[in-house]
Image (cartoon, coloured by chain):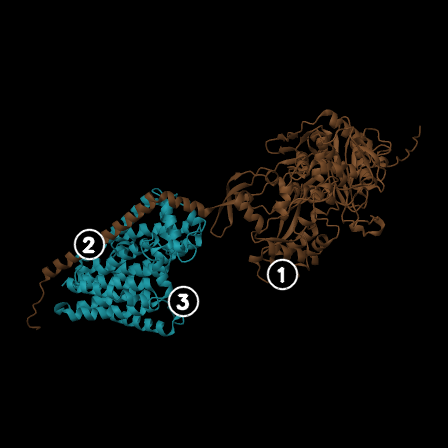
Chain colours: A brown, B cyan
Amino acid sequence: MSQHKELRDHQREIYFFRLRLITSFVFMLLLALLLVSRLVFLQIFKQDEFSMLADKNRISVVPIVPNRGLITDRNGIVLAQNYSGYTLEISPAKLSKDMESTINELSTIVDISAKDRKRFKKLLTESHTSNSYPIRSRLNEQEVARFAAQSYRFPGVEIKARLFREYPYKDRTSHLIGYVGRINDKDSEQLDDKGLAANYRGSDYIGKLGIEQSYEEALHGITGFEDVEVDAAGRGVRVLSRTAPKSGDNLKLTMDIKLQEIAEEAFGNFRGALVAIDPNNGEVLAYVSKPGYDPNLFVDGIDSDNWDALNNSPDVPLINRPLRGQYPPGSTIKPFMALSGLDSGKRTASYAISDPGYFMLPGNRHQYRDWKTGGHGRVDLFKSIVISCDTYFYSLANDMGIDSIHDYLEKFGFGKKTGLDMEGESPGLLPSQDWKRRRFNQIWYPGDTVSVGIGQGYTLVTPMQLAYAVSIIANSGKGYKPHLVREITNSTEHTVKEIKPEVTVNLSLKPEHLEIVKHAMTAVTLPGGTAAYAGSGAAYEFAGKTGTAQVIGIKQGEKYNANEIAERHRDHAWFIAFAPADKPRIALAVLAENAGHGGTVSAPIARKVIDYYLLGKVPPQSRYAPQPEEKEEPEND
Amino acid sequence: MIEKLQRRFMLHLDPILLGALAVLALLSLIIIYSASSGSIDRVVGQAINILVAFLALWLIANMPLHFLMRIAVPIYVLGMVLLIGVALFGDIQNGARRWLNIGIATIQPSELMKIAIPLMMAWYFEKHEATLEWKNYLIATVILAVPFLLILRQPDLGTAMLIAASGFYLLFLAGLHWKIMTGLLVTALGSAPFLWHMLHDYQRQRILMLLDPMKDPLGKGYHTIQGMIAVGSGGSLGKGYLNGTQTHLEFLPERSTDFIFAVFSEEFGLIGNILLLAIYIFILWRGFIITANASTYFTRLMAGSITLTFFTYTFVNMGMVTGILPVVGVPLPLISYGGTSMLTLYLGFGMLMSIQSHKTLVQS
């Protein structure tokens, strides 16, 4: 084979080599062309897309939480405010050690109580949206300094300065103002649903109850944003642009905190509720729920001890009585029944019954007893209200029939929400044939109607409803929607939005019918009336109606004896009132739980509230009572 | 006197090639300054790398061609011994066994093989120039394949592929028949599944990521995505020197080494890229001229392989940064920070210069 092999032609070899060299050069140029086209694609056609991605990389949007709006009473006294303070916060994800030992070590530097620990644990289980959770709030300057010096030992623990919500009137305003609390998983879900999640970036708190909850949107404000250039490690390099936050709106309430306090003081040790309304515009002047609780406990999460104490208390301080407490109205329903009787033509002012002390349905031996054994004798409509005659109203109810009663009482707002600007209102209960069929699948018996006439039976009302209803009588048939907020001030634009009174109902009641009922209610507080004691010496015409709502039923033939019944089973004492009777400026409903007679407990509370509201009269035991003036030192000449 | 020294200094250096290298060396320092966010240490370090590499270039350029012929076998043997040493006793770094501790320093023998393999193959072809037949090509292929497989197993996919490319260029230039070449290509494609099995997980991930980097933008696709963002957001004119946000806010990984092209692209845009590519093509062109004029079979093969391999490096790096090739850890020739890569490349260019300047002396 090798003999056949010629020596290669050198020129030919060079030629072939150069051919291959050129081929490879062309191939390299093709590769270069591929690169250029890729670069053109990326840098020309995709430039916008990649520029956007580069910006997304480097620009981090940092929320600036707005200051929450203040809440004041109608005179500008602050009921909910912000103060700046320090919290010690733990970011569980950044901890290098386990939570328990971190907290133990922290407690050697900063005072951490068992309550703090419990509260912190509860917080951790309830919320997963936040990165850091406060283990201690309201650190003092020394604690801040001590921690700052040791902070290197605690990665994932830091001190944060921020605004806290504070309620200076504590339990006086608990059910009215409510409170803010940390945003939990449920809250963030709701925010997502409402499309508000973006505005709550960076926010830790949200209104949970009361005004804080119902006016959350206005109070929260608009979150501002800072575009911060960050490096790959997330460190801020510089601020590119800033959109200032807009502080939440300030709310001016319709209520007068002083009136509210005087009302609460007037309750003494009784539990209960009081709602006072200006009948001319629906402004709620006082909103008492006793007992209350300290809303400040809830702001950073309540510890389990405090929670258990509140939640298990027999006084149920956590229930918002004016709005959610549903009670039988008792005799306070009688003025409304009377107006219904007159308007329906079932009764006239002059029509009178002879009261034997009980009422019996035809063909039935059951006795519906009057509160007064032996009866009141001859009773007309006027007297029936003044002395609160049950027999008269048993008979009236029976004559009207339940559906007619339902339709009339509904006009006064019973059985439905008043539309108060606070969430969670209960509608009460106004029975009807239809209702009973739906609720119990039973027919309505005539006997059911009888007790409805005196505000017992199925009927349930809230103190709010009763105050609203009496304000309609006070205002001669015209009702205004009760509301708690008077003005909303936008603190950024300095605009004030006043809440206009909103007419809800304008009943065409005959003036003479109104006249007789108002007259009778005025007589209730005069000698001979059921609230004569509370009305004695009033410097104005004081219209009212007592009521006693049974908590337990009394068997046939038994007699109610307050002394023999456990305190919790005693009757609730109602009083509804308005004054001055000829030109009412205030209408209210008072409920004292298990207090017995409306005339002896609730009416005096109403009197004190009205005395202060109309006359500026401060009860001597009030903290607002004028202190005896100190004698001035005689000056030397 | 000085003029004489100057002449002696420049005697074996190719001024055209040297000029292009100088431009890129300056560019390297400028870009590293930006990529390292103004670190003078880094710039000085690279300047030292360049000076050392240049010293090697000068020495090689001044060596006569037979010197290269003489060292081919010993260097290849030494490289193989070291490679086997790595396979047996190598240090593991980042899951790869690439480094060998030889007492005074830790070395990466695969870098040495980048030069040793073409040298050995060119030497072999030169020896059998007169009687080349198919079995010579087969032996040359074995000379390439053994170290290739050793490096692939380390694993170092990038270096292995580049060494395979340089060997293949040599076979191609040595006149391997088209048919065989087609056969080799088919074999290579056919053995792809087998190679796939030989690959380590992270290498497979890199190839898979290339197909869809968005699958894992913060993990395995991060390098590619951030590189493409840097290049793409540079646009036609770039963001301006020292103004690249991807670079200076440190979103870009490996800024002064493997991804330095992304830094350049972001700050100088498409115009800058085309100019840069033009310089590389210019060097490629000069290499071809030197190759075409080379006097012996050995030097032609050597010069061709060096030139083609150099440009292949460039293509692979740019392709990797722009997302058309997997991230294989190949620096941008003559620009990326790093002493070893600089030294290897300058040695190659030293050989080119030696081939250019010594051709008249050895022409037979």
**Mark closer to the observer (2, 1):** 1
Q: CA distance from mark 2 to mark 1?
A: 72 Å
Farthest front residue in view: A363
Q: Which of the 4 quarters of the picture holds residue A199?
A: top right
Chain that bears disc 3:
B
Q: Amino acid at mark 1?
A: Thr
Amino acid tagged 3: Gly
Q: Residue shown at 85%/50% (left/top)?
A: A563
Name the residue at the bottom extreme: B88
From the image, tell me which residue sits under label 3: B95
Mark 2 or 3 closer to N-term? 3
Q: Nearer the viewer, residue A124 or B12?
A: A124
Residue A535 can be seen, yes or no:
yes
**Disc 2: which residue:** B289
Kind of residue at badge 2 = Ile
Q: Residue at x 84, y 52 (%)?
A: A564
Is A391 placed above or below B229 here?
Answer: above
**Can see residue A181?**
no
Q: Is residue A452 left or right of residue A18?
A: right
**Up-down relation of residue A90 to residue B131 (above or below):** above
Q: Dividing the picture into quarters, in which one does residue A281 lie? A: top right
Horizontal arrangement in the rendering, residue A7 relative to residue B116 (left or right): left
Residue A539 tag number: none
Q: Position of residue A202 (x, y in %)?
A: 56, 46
Mark 1 highlights which residue? A102
State the residue in front, B62 or B87. Answer: B87
Label 1 environment density (alpha carbons within 10 Å; few <14, some 14–19, many ≥20): some
SS at mark 1 in the image: helix
Q: Quadrant of the N terminus of chain B?
A: bottom left
Q: Secondary structure at mark 2?
A: helix
Q: Quadrant of the C terminus of chain B?
A: bottom left
